[in-house]
Image (cartoon, helix red, strand yellow):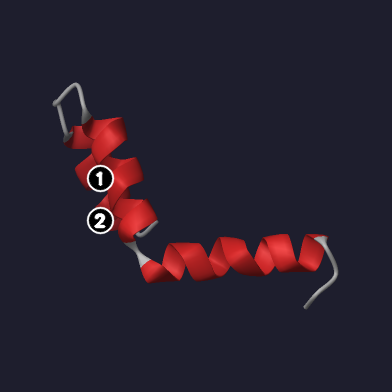
Amino acid sequence: PTPDEVETYVSDKQPDKFNRLVDRLLKSPHYGEKWGRHWLDLVRYA
């Protein structure tokens, strides 16, 4: 995460901040592409 994203997360006082972060990451195509590459490397398709 960027420094601004870290600061925003740390300063967020809402009890559901972790759930909202996970939802945001799972909706991001970049997050899926990054982890997809790791899994493909793991099973040696890359």
Q: Position of residue 2 (x, y in %)?
A: 35, 60
| Type of amino acid at the residue the image marks with label 2 | Asp
Find residue 31 and report its horizontal and vertical position in percent: 45, 63
Which residue lies at the image location 58% right of the left edge and 61% below the top edge? 35
Disc number for residue 7: 1
Which quadrant, please, contains the N terminus? bottom left
Are the residues at dot 1 and dot 2 in contact (C-beta closer than 8 Å)?
yes
Q: Nearer the viewer, residue 46 or 11?
A: 46
Q: Residue at x 83, y 62 (%)?
A: 43
Q: CA distance from mark 1 to mark 2?
A: 5 Å
Q: Is residue 36 left or right of residue 11?
A: right
Residue 28 is situated, as x and y percent measured from the top left of the image, at 35, 64
> Could you say which is closer to the camera, residue 12 or residue 3?
12
Pointer 2 residue? 4
Tag 1 secondary structure:
helix
Q: Amino acid at mark 1?
A: Glu
